[in-house]
């Protein structure tokens, strides 16, 4: 194992240790806090200098978080295979690369479409193969890493912000810090995540899923690209974002084009 990979794994351990007060409080008090839907730190394997780090906002109430989702919610730490590749997740009764099958869940299906477009733009071997497992499938998890800005699961981003706002005084106690408002607390969490990503993961590019994700990660400094509702950061030259409002399968392919342009310059 390369020294950078070892340092990445140890830094990830420290990141999860940092999150532990949140994990413990919300999990132990979930009977009184029904908005809480479990915790997940990473949705993939750890990868040093991935081609793309995909960032979501926070875990939703759904698959890959709890098997029996309506009962006691758990904390899922450590790395795991990319969930979008699980059978039947992106496509109904189909494997992830069988794009001729109808969509089961738009979110993983769009991520798969992004990966295929990225393969096409970067001329990965066999990128044009239709409905067959591509030859680059075995190496894709060394190219793609996926996390969320915040590890606490809720129905949506608004519910997460309300959760933090309602418990702001408690957050000050848990982290021995003063937070003037809920955004100050999120900035506190984001700074820790930025340190982990910038100094240990060192991704070649970053794709932010959702306008809120792009706004938070780039400290509100971003603008629309030549593609409608596809964004570029004013602060970080390797960060691209895509709006998830409505139907966004076309936008995700345009985001792949911008990501590929950045990769070609590296």
Image (cartoon, rainbow, N blue to C red):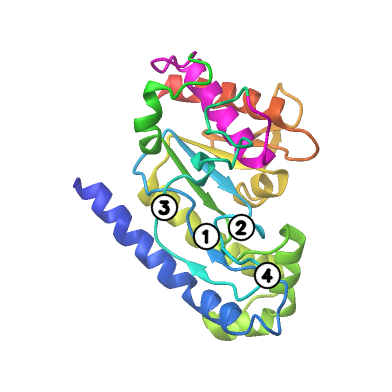
What residue appears at the point 59 percent right and 68 percent down from the top-left corner?
38
Residue in the foreground of this view, choosing between 48 and 222: 48
Q: Is residue 252 visible?
A: yes
Q: Secondary structure at mark 3?
A: loop
Q: Position of residue 169 (x, y in %)?
A: 67, 84
Q: Earlier along the polypeptide chain: callout 3 or callout 1?
A: 3
Residue holding disc 1: 191
Tell me which segment is drawn in magenta.
101-128
Neighbor class of circle 3 (other Cα within 10 Å; few <14, some 14-19, many 20+) is: few
Decide: marks 3, 4 in contact (CB < 8 A)?
no
**Left or right: 66 with respect to 167?**
left
Residue holding disc 3: 80
What residue appears at the point 42 percent right and 22 percent down from the top-left corner?
134
Q: Earlier along the polypeptide chain: callout 2 or callout 1?
A: 2
Q: Position of residue 24 (x, y in %)?
A: 52, 80
Marks 3 and 2, how far apart at CA: 15 Å
């Amino acid at each position: 194992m390369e020294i950078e990979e070892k340092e990445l794994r140890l830094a990830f351990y420290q990141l999860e240790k940092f999150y532990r007060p949140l994990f413990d409080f919300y999990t132990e008090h979930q009977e009184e806090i029904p908005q809480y839907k479990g915790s997940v730190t990473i949705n993939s394997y750890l990868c040093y200098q991935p081609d793309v780090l995909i960032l979501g906002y926070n875990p939703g109430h759904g698959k890959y978080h709890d098997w029996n989702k309506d009962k006691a919610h758990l904390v899922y730490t450590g790395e795991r295979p990319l969930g979008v590749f699980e059978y039947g997740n992106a496509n109904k009764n189909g494997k992830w690369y069988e794009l001729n099958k109808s969509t089961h869940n738009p979110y993983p299906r769009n991520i798969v479409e992004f990966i295929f477009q990225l393969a096409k733009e970067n001329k990965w071997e066999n990128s044009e193969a239709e409905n067959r497992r591509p030859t680059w499938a075995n190496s894709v998890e060394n190219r793609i890493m996926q996390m969320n800005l915040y590890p606490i699961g809720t129905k949506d981003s608004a519910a997460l912000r309300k959760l933090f706002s309602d418990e702001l005084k408690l957050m000050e106690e848990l982290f021995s810090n003063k937070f003037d408002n809920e955004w100050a607390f999120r900035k506190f969490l984001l700074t820790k995540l930025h340190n982990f990503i910038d100094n240990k993961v060192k991704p070649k590019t970053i794709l932010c899923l959702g306008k809120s994700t792009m706004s938070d990660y780039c400290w509100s400094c971003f603008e629309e690209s030549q593609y409608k509702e596809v964004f570029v950061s004013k602060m970080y030259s390797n960060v691209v974002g895509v709006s998830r409002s409505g139907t966004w399968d076309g936008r995700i392919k345009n985001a792949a084009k911008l990501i590929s342009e950045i990769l070609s310059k590296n």
